[in-house]
Amino acid sequence: MQKLLILVLLLSSFFSLYSKDKIFDPKINRIVEETYSLIIEEKYKSAKQKIFQCLNIYPKNFQCLIQLDIIYNCTYNAEDAQKTRAKILEIWNQDFKRDWIKQGRPIRTSTWARFVKIYGSYSVIGTEYFVPEVSGEGVLTLSNYYKIIMRPLKRNLKFRIFKLEMSNVDQKYYVLSEISNNGFTQIIPYGSKLPSFLQLMQDFEKLLKKAKL
């Protein structure tokens, strides 16, 4: 129950950042909140049914489309996840990008959750940047495309963050690295090709299942 409460609060906080998209329909609000719980419990069939109750009334609702994207990725449905991703980016570019730029490109609204599962004592949240996050200058420029957050569900564990980054010193080179106070630790190299989000999460899951993280 504690794990479920933490994740519901976390996702609710994430979605509440997009104030333009708030629904003032009590029934739809209830559906959205109930869907958070179903996703964390991995009851994807029931969650999808609730999401479509919302989308049948509000077909461009940002929160519900993000929830649908999470379900497709967590059930490894690459085709439908890609279609839903395209809708999310279209809405973000139309309704949110301008304000995001005016606000100074805040980090907290730079990504959206695309994968959420609990592994052992961690909640694993895979996210994608709406626009790649760029840091550094010249040949030292890094571009981040995806971010994975491992949020501990026990107090004695550390919060962990991973980013899929691309460097371009001699040629494009993609790698998933863990970010810590000690710098960057390469975890999964991908060479010259950007992996899809789902490929990254499946590779990351394999490491989690082998207890190599």
Image (cartoon, rainbow, N blue to C red):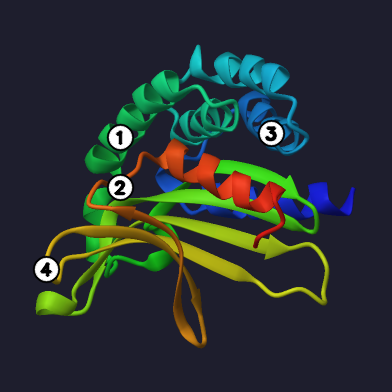
Q: Position of residue 166 (x, y in %)?
A: 26, 61
Which residue is pictured at 49% across the width and 35% down the height?
A: 66
Q: Are marks 3 and 1 in contact (CB under 8 Å)?
A: no
Q: Earlier in the sequence, mark 3 or mark 1?
A: 3
| Mark 1 lies on residue | 91
Separation of residues labelled 1 and 4 (CA atoms):
36 Å
Decide: few, some or many residues near mark 2? Use Cα within 10 Å; few <14, some 14-19, many ≥20.
Answer: some
| Mark 4 lies on residue | 170
Separation of residues labelled 2 and 1 (CA atoms):
7 Å
- Disc 3 residue type (three-letter): Ile
The dot on residue 96 is 2
Horizontal side of residue 169 vs 111, given as left or right: left
Separation of residues labelled 4 and 3 (CA atoms):
42 Å
| Mark 3 lies on residue | 39
Q: Earlier in the sequence, mark 4 or mark 3?
A: 3
Separation of residues labelled 3 and 2 (CA atoms):
25 Å
Q: Residue furthest bottom?
A: 182
**Near-viewer residue (172 or 72):** 172
Which type of secondary structure does the marked residue at label 4 adopt? loop
Image: 141 above or below 38: below
Q: Earlier in the sequence, mark 3 or mark 2?
A: 3
Q: Earlier in the sequence, mark 2 or mark 4?
A: 2
Which type of secondary structure does the marked residue at label 3 adopt? helix
Q: Are marks 2 and 1 in contact (CB under 8 Å)?
A: yes
Which type of secondary structure does the marked residue at label 1 adopt? helix
Separation of residues labelled 2 and 4 (CA atoms):
35 Å
Q: Earlier in the sequence, mark 1 or mark 4?
A: 1
Which residue is pictured at 36% across the width and 27% down the height?
A: 82
Horizontal side of residue 7 vs 182, given as left or right: right
- Disc 2 residue type (three-letter): Phe
Q: Quadrant of residue 50?
A: top right
Q: Nearer the viewer, mark 3 or mark 2?
A: 3
